[in-house]
Each structure stands twice: as C-alpha cells, then as structure tokens.
Amino acid sequence: MSEPILKIEDLDVRYATSQALFGVSVDVAPGSVLAVLGANGAGKSTLARAISGLVRPFGGRVVFDGRDITGKSAHHVRRLGLTYIPEGRGVFPGLTVIDNLKMAVAQEKRNDRAPAIDRAIDMFPVLGSRRSQLAGSLSGGEQQMLALARAVAVLPKLIIADEMSLGLAPQIVEAVFQSLEETRRAGVTIVLSEQFVHRALSLADTCVILSRGRVGWSGPASEAGTEVIDRYLGDAEHPAPAAS
Amino acid sequence: MLEAGVGTETSVLSARGITVRFGGLNALSDVDLDVAPRSIAGLVGPNGAGKTTMLAVLSGLLRPTQGRVWLRGEDVTDASAQARARGGIARTFQQPELFLGLTVREHLVLADRVHFAPRRLWSDMLDPRSLLPASSAENERVDGLLELLNLTRVAKAPVAALPLGVCRLVEVGRALAGQPHVILLDEPLSGLDMKSSENLLSVFQRVVAQTDRDVSLLMVEHDVAAVLALSNWIFVLDFGERIAADCPDVIRRDPAVRSAYLGDEESVEGEPEVPVAGEGGEVEP
Amino acid sequence: MLEFVIAGLVLGGIYAIASAGLVITYTASGILNFAFGAMAFFIARFYYYLHTEHSWGILPAAIVAIGLAGPIMGIFLYAVLFRYLRFNSPLIKVVATVGLLVAIPALATIIFGSGAILQAPGLAPEPVHVYQFLGVPITLDDIIVYICVVATVVLGAGVLRFTEVGLKVRAMVDSPAMTDLSGTNPDLVSGGVWAVSVFFAGLTGVLAAPIIGLDPNKFTVLIAAAFAAVIAAKMRSLPIAVGVGLLMGIATSLAERYLPSNSQWSGEIIDAIPFIVIAVVLLYSLLRRGRMGDVERVGGALDRAITPQGESRLAGSTSGALESGSLGLISKYAGPFLLIVAAGALPLIVQGYWVGLTAAAFAYAVIFLSWTLVTGEGGMLWLCQITFAGVGAITTAELATTHGWPVLAAVAVGGVIAMLMGLVVGLLSIRLGDLYVALVTLTFGLLVENLVFTLPSFVNSGLGLTVNPPSFATSSRVLAYLFLGIFVVIALFILNFRRSTSGLAMNAVRWSDPGARTTGVSVVQMKVTVAALAALVAGIGGGLLAIQQSTIAPGTFDTFLGVVWLAVLVTIGIRSTAAAIIAGLSFVMLPALAQAYLPTWTGNIPPLLFGLGAISAAKYPDGALAEQSRRFRNQLLRLADRQKPPLVIDTLSGPALADDAVGTATGTAQSAVAVGKAP
C-alpha cells in the first residue's frame, strides 16, 4: 500500500459541552474510496468538519498529502486540494449557479477559471441551462449536482462528501453516485459518509464504522458484512420496512 | 389500538387543506391530517418534504396560506402558539429550544404552573410568598415526571451544559408537564445513539399508555423503521404533498412511498436498505 | 419646489452614504454599528486637526483622514473586536458597539482636546464657492456631496454586482462557512467590508461637518436619522436604504419650506421626520403581523451547525430559584448585603458636599436598577432609560413646584407616566426583535430630547426647573437614606421577581421565543410588562435625582449621556442589584474624586474606561466586575465542596464529561466554552 494521502491520528474533537470524537485514527490510500458509516450522532459529520478545518480538533493530528493540516483554517485546507462538500447542500443558496461556480474556482489562476467552469458544466449539463438561477431555488438533486460540480471544477486531490444522498429521490441518488464514480475514475480520492449503507459499500474500497465517537470497526469494504453492520448500525434492532 | 379516524369529532388534532407558500414555492399543498386520541402517529418523508413546516403550522408558529386546524373539535387556526399550548398542543424541536438560564427542574415547574396556576405568572411578581416551597401536588407531579424520564439526577443542573440526548428528554418533560392532549415531536431521535433512542421510544409508549393522561403523539422522524414500529398511523409527505396515510403495515408495502422515500429499488429481499438518518437534519425552505 | 429638492439632496445624500455604510456591515457581519456616528465624528475631527489646526492641504488631509485612518480603524476594530462578535447574541453586539460609541468620543477628546467646534470646513476650499443653479445657490460643498452620493451608488452597485471582490462579499453574506470551504478567507473579506464601512463613516463625517459642526452628540443624532433609512430597508437592502435616506433629506427640506417658519411646531416636525419614518415602517410591519424577518441569523444551516454553542451570552447564570445548598445561598447574598450596608454607612462617614453626592449616587442607582430589570432579567437593551428618568424628573418638577403636589406623590406620578411611555414604545418595537428594540429606543430618546425636553417652559431660559425636597428631608443625609430605602424596596422586588414564576417565564421568553410560546407563555406580554416596569423604575429614579439636584438643568437627560450610564452599569454588572449601587457610586464619585484630587485632563479617562468596559461585555457578559466576584465565590465554594462527588450525567446518551459537569455544578457558563474553532 502506498503512502496514505490522508492520515488521521488519534483525533479528539470536543464541542461546547460534550466530546464528539475520541481518538479516531484512519488512513486513506490515494485514489481509493473510504466509506464512513455510523448511526445518528456517531460523529461522521464532526470527523468531516475536523478534517476540513471548520472545527478545530482538541487533540490528534491530520496529515494531508504529506502536510500537517491539524487546526489549519478551512480555506487553507481547500487550497491544498482537499474539498469538503458539507451535509445538506454544499452551495450558496443566495447566489446564482454561475456565481456558485465562480466562487469555487476563485482560487485558481485567472486563465484556468473559465475552462474549469466549462468542465464542471460539461459533467453536469443540467446546470448549464440554469446558470442565472439562484442555487437555493434548484431542486435538492440539482443542488447536490452543483455541490459536486463545485468540487470537481478545481480537480481536487480529495473530496469529502457528507451525506450526499440525504433526502433525495432514488433516481437522483443513483445519478449522484454515478458522478462520484466518474470523479473517482479521474483519480480523485473520495471519503464518503452515507446513509445508504450498501450503496456506499458498493463504491468503497475501505470502510470505517464510527460508534459514539470512536472507531468501532474498520477494514476492507468487502469484509463489512451483514454481521458487522448490524452490530454497529443496529439495523437489526428495529424491524425494517419489508422489502418487495 | 385506535386507528386515526377521519372527521374532526373523533380526532384530538385535525388539519384540512393546509397549504403554505414561501415566495413562489409550495412548501405544503393541501395536506390533511388527523391524530386520534391516545395514539401515536408518524409523519415521514424525504428532506424538504414539509414535515417541519407542518409541525410549525399545527403548533401555531407559522400561519398557513390556506387551510384550517382543529384541536379537539375547536377551530384554532387563528389562535396564537401560546393559546394553542394552553389549549393542549405541546411540541419539541429538532434543535432543542430550551431556556438556557433555567435548570432541568425549572423547565418542568414552569410548564406545570402555566397549566395549573397560570395566574402565578403575573401575581408572583408582587407576592413574596413565591419564595416559599412549592405545593406538594406540584412537587409530586414534577418529580414524577423527572422520575419517568430518568432525569432526577440532573434535575438541578442548568440545561446549558447538558448533552443533546438529555436536552431532548427535557423538552419532552416540559411538554408533558403542561398536561397536553397532543405532543408534536420534531425528530426526537436525531443525534441520539441506539440506547438513548430505545429509552426515549419506550418512554413514548409508556406515556401514551398511562391511564391518568390523555395524550397523543405526532412524530416527525428520519428513522422510518422506528416510526413504523411505534406508530398506529403513518402520514407520508413528499414535495409538500401527502402521498399516503395508512397504518404501518400498509405503508411498508406502498410502492409510491417506497420509491419516494426508501429508495431501495435495488435491494435484495431480506437485506433492506434502511436509511440511517443524518446527524444534522432536514433543511426546510 | 425644485430648489428645495436640490437643497434636500445634500442632507439626504449624507443620510444615504451613512445608511449604506451601516447596511453593508450589517449584512456582511450581522453587526449594526451604533458607533457609526462616533466614528464619523472621530475621522471628521482628525481631518479638522490636520487641515485646520495643522494647515495641511485639503487633498492630503482628506486622503490621510478618510482614506487611511478610516479603513485602518475599521480593520483594527474588526481584528480586535468585531470578528469575535459574529456568533454572539444581538444584545452583546449592540452593547459592544454602544461601548465604542462612548469610548471613541472620549478618546477623541483626549487626543484632540475638548471643546465643541461649531464651524468646520468641508472638502471645498475656503471661502466656499457658491454657484447658481436654476436660481438656487449651491455651494461647492453641496456639489461634492452630490458627487460622493453618485459615486457611492454607482461604484458600490458595480463592485458588488460585477467584480470578483463583490462576489466574495455576496458569498460571505450568504454563508461564511461555505466561503471558507471555497478557499476564500472570510476574515479578509469581513475586514475589507469593515474598512469600507468606516471609510463611509469618515466620508459622512467630513461631509456633514460644515452643516452640523464637530460635536459627537450631533453626529449621533445625524446617524439616528440614518437608522430610520436602515430600518426602512429592513437592515439589508442597500437600494432602499439609500433611497429612503435621500427622500428623508428632501422631506426635511420641503418641510422647512412649506411649514410656517414662525411656529414652534414646524421645527419640531422637522426634527421628528426620522422618527415619523420609523413609526410608519414599524406600524406597517406590525399591521402585516410579520416579524421583520430573521434579523438575527447570519449564514446558513452549516454556519449554525459549527457555531460554538453556549458561549458568551449576556447573563448566563441560572435564576437560582431552585439553587441548592445553604452555603451557595449565603455566599450569593452575603456579598450584596454587606455592600448595601457599607453603602448605607457612607452618608454617616463623609461630610458636607460629599453627602449630597452620596444621595445623588443612590438616585442614579435607582435609575440603574431599571436596566437590571429590563436588560439583566428581560434580556432587552433599552437605550432610552435616561429619557424615562427625564420624564420622571420634569413631571416631578411640574407637579410639585408648579401645582403644589407633595413631592413624593409627584415622583410616583412621574414614574407612572414614564411607564405608559415604556408600554407604547415596547408594544411598537418588542415584537420585531432585540435589535429593533435598541434602535427604536435610541431614536425615541433623541426624539423626546429634541421635542419635549427643549420646550421653552422646561428650558426656562436656560435656568431649568426647580424642585424642593420633601419637608421632612431637611438634610442631604436624610435624603440619602430616603433614596437608599427606595432602592432597597425596588431591589427586593427584582430579587423576588427573579425567583418567582414570573422570573421563570421571563427567563423562558428570553432564551427561546418558540420554546416559550409553545409552552404557553406569551413573549410579547412578558417582555412588554418587564419593559414597562423598568420604565417606571427609571421614572422614579429620575424624580429622585431631580429632588437631589433641586434644579433640572437643560441637558441633564441627553440620550447620549444615558448611553454612558449604560456603559457604566454594563462594566460593573448588569444582573446584580448590588452592581447598580456600585455603578451609581462610581458614576458620581470617580469624576468628583478626579476633579478634587487629579489634574483636569484625567476627567476624560472614566468615560473611556466605561466605554471599554462595555465593549468587554463581549468577553464578560455579566460585567467584568461581576465576573471577578463570581470567580472568587466559586473558588470559595469549590474549597468547601471538595468532599462531594462530581455530578455525573449518566441518564441517557451522550458522552457526558465529569469535569464539564463540575463546571455546571458551580454555575460557570464560561467554563463550558467551546473548543470549536473561533469564528
């Protein structure tokens, strides 16, 4: 295995009154897909926010692409090539689609910006017809497309996608996952936190299951069988809706 | 178990034709809803389906563009949120709306007095007797609730420093202390781990079963499995419209619901895709 | 008519630039800058210092003052203050900028010397050239104002809409967290916005100086008028703010033309135009049953999700109604009790002139209790308590001196009249949210100050009104004890309120509007009641102050002075009744001591310190002094409490931390400060 592109060592995160992550360690190999799974409140979003610099860790280390980015601010981390798509539509709802894309590429060299925006729109043609529409007025799926477009426009080294399919209709979830696969084929490392456990595992190479802020299980995605998932995600605890 | 009936006479809470427009967007279109006495009803649907908006309309925090709301047969559409609260609608919030200057117990005491001694809200100002110990009936009710919710040990702690799970319980306690006829629960399980979720769900079941109360629950929840297991009746919203309303067994088989919400067309029999809801939650328009 | 429109565009243009400066920082950082007028004054005074006092040319002086000093001040204040305020409550934001409003003029006086300057040059060379346009005389100063307005509008709109910088500012307004995630440093953008805003403040100041002179009071009045445009724009719309600003200027000019110039009322209506605009906007929005929108939120869901919760709130301590442990209770009340006993001994210890000052201090302490109630308990920032005090004082004088009432009965009636005014102002503003309360009360104070307190019968040719003390209070000493007695009665009322059901309900209303309403507590009723009671207390305090001073000189109850009073109380402690008495003594005694024993120039240091103290509310919401005493008390409690096991929350869920819970048990909200990244 090559040197990991993202190395998280013993990460602790505390919020005002409680600790959200306890000594979490994860390695992500370049070009791979990591699925971060866990029940509600297990700390998935907190982990993503701590890596991306939105929340300052209390202890531990985050090394990205050979550099220590622990406690670095979010804009700094982004400029190093790590893009975080936050849970719940990573767009500026009050800006137009094109302004959203312009903000995404604002750190690129001046000559590279227009091609970057064109590339993003080529990948998500639906955005092309909505250039001057406010992002907040797009449908949920279109907003996620825009969020992904914003991420891939700059050709990042790593994308953290947090709950991208939350609240989307199935066809749209499918489209989102297809875009993620394309992104991965382009050589981008992906860290994925997902509610659709099996869908996420089908894309992932490795898997980490968080449980109450700790790493409960980690290993190759192919080994994350029903037993492991049931134990940590507790599907078996509730009668599931009957499958057709 | 009672089934949520149609018709306002038999329902503790009813809504007809609720429509809410934000700008040009229809957050809710012509939604009907009934909650039967002493029942648990579930309100589910994808993100942005209008669930939280519906609770805001029912609790009086948001005025619908169209439609009417009845509480125990009485039209409360034009009543303020505080008037509805006194009439018997209590609620909890997705992000707990607690009173950061008060202790856990004080939350319950306040709600109890609003119900049993509303005059004290004003008369206490000029009455030094408010410094005396509270009446034993009040203490009994409040302590009983604290016991029920397993909050006795944190009763005197200010809520500002409590973990989210405990905050949710305090909200439920505050709601119950007002002796409501119906409690609207907005994502009561979000942010809770398995054990806390189970505890809270068992509290819900016990509360509805208690003979000395007459309370129904209407629950908005991401965790569909939990809702289906607990509820007598389910309403499904999608893009602001009610796409189904039936008992849980029927809802499980409803193809429209499955395609709109569960998104498990591909899943193999016996290995269903159970959505494990996210940590934050729904972003309403 | 056209000529008056043209003339009105000068004042309107100044309003427009000021309101543009206010709106951009509000939208970009959620802070309504109450110190805008003070900043405008400071820069204008600096320009005067360079240009007039040190004979710099107009251009270099303008570039250094407006173009350099202004933006530097904006960036400095952003770096040391505003960036930390973003996620604070509106109350803290207002208190901090009010602190600046007090500190900046004090600093200006220390740097540039005191004394109001009535005549100040603008940006046009002296003597100012006068042109004729359609038969209307227009000065070069006027033309410069027009140019600046057009430049502001065209450049401002152009930059915001078409440039990358403008895009970043709009992105920042939409969501600071998303901006950060897009690779743009939100601090740089915000700092830039503040630099531009203070640049506008400086421009406003220098443009307005030829019209209103250099007097911090007048600048605050001018900016209060700009607030009207900001309120009409619902704090956010730049075009509406600029448009309403221009229209108000034109309306003022037309009123000057068409109202009979010899009538007292004409002048009053002209002064009242901004207030009329505010009243119309407020009534309109109340009739539409709407709130003015979510004025307190900055950014989106993500920004709120990463906001450190439980940090810096004004008065975070518990009501204490159910606080346990006799030691806790004793240590909580012993301090204040001893303090009041010590204060009570003061009139016996000191002699002569100083006894009178003690009585005055106690009268101020009563007025300060009005804030203990409305801000400490009610969580609302009222900036017109001094106006209520003035109403109380004038009513006392009118009834007692002119109509022969018993003086204490007159004081009571004065309080009741103030209470009724508080009721009306509360009903108009409270529904709209905390920020509007502060804005409306400030404007209301200025309106009453300019319309009522200046009536000839009250000014009495500059002599003011006289009040005689009650017949039994023959000496200052008796008066001091009478006031102290009244103070204790009101303080006991507040203590009882805090611990009563009403106190619980008020606390509920204050911390969560939807939570309180859905628990069955009416937010508006509760807040209006507390505000009206506070106005009653202020009115009574004003009557007492009038008795002590025996004459009510014009200017005693200027709104700006009331803001200084508030800064004093916030510095010492807004929640504690004992703090009110210390604040009263500090406000009266410190300047007197300085005057008696220190060189004259030190006289400006107390206001500067109080201003800085109020700014520190951002760090110590309960007041710097109150914070220190609470720490001391917690130390004592911790020593005594060693044996008890820490309170561990293990009921349900959540990784509760034992050490956090200990912080809880000792009641320090601050100990639970988030480790989350500072905004």
Image (cartoon, grey):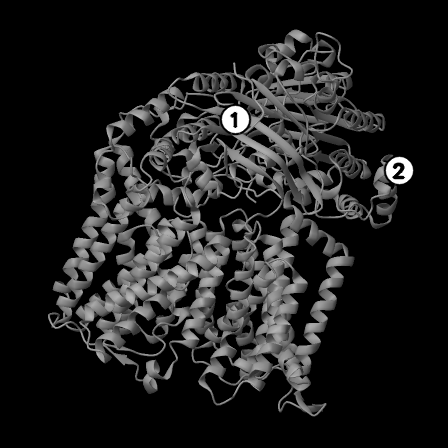
Q: Residue at left 81%, top 49%?
A: A132
Task: Please give the chain letter of the residue carrying mark 1.
Answer: B
Is residue B98 found left or right of C20 in the rendered image?
left
Query: Which amino acid type corresponds to the residue marked 1 in the rendered image?
Result: Ser
| Residue where numbered disc 2 is placed | A122
* C-alpha gap between disc 2 and disc 1: 54 Å
Q: Are marks 2 and 1 on the same chain?
A: no
Using the image, determine if residue C398 lies above or below residue A14.
Answer: below
Image quadrant occupied by the C terminus of chain C: top right
| Residue where numbered disc 1 is placed | B11
Query: Which amino acid type corresponds to the residue marked 2 in the rendered image?
Result: Asp
Using the image, determine if residue B249 lies above or below residue B5.
Answer: above
- Viewer-proximal residue among C600 and C239: C239
- Where is residue C387? Give x, y as percent: 37, 68
Q: From where the camera sits, is residue C642 visible?
A: no
- Where is residue A95? Give x, y as percent: 73, 48
Is residue B133 found left or right of A133 in the rendered image?
left
Is residue B92 found left or right of C542 in the rendered image?
right
For numbered disc 1, what is the local secondary structure?
loop
Q: In which quarter of the view is residue A63 placed?
A: top right
Nearest to viewer (mark 2 / mark 1): 1
Image quadrant occupied by the N terminus of chain C: bottom right
For numbered disc 2, what is the local secondary structure?
helix
Numbered-mark total:
2
Q: In which quarter of the view is residue A135 placed?
A: top right
- Where is residue B246? Give x, y as percent: 63, 19
Q: From where the camera sits, is residue C8 visible?
A: yes
Which label is found at residue C576? none
Q: Residues within 10 Å of mark 2 (few under 14, many from 20)?
A: few
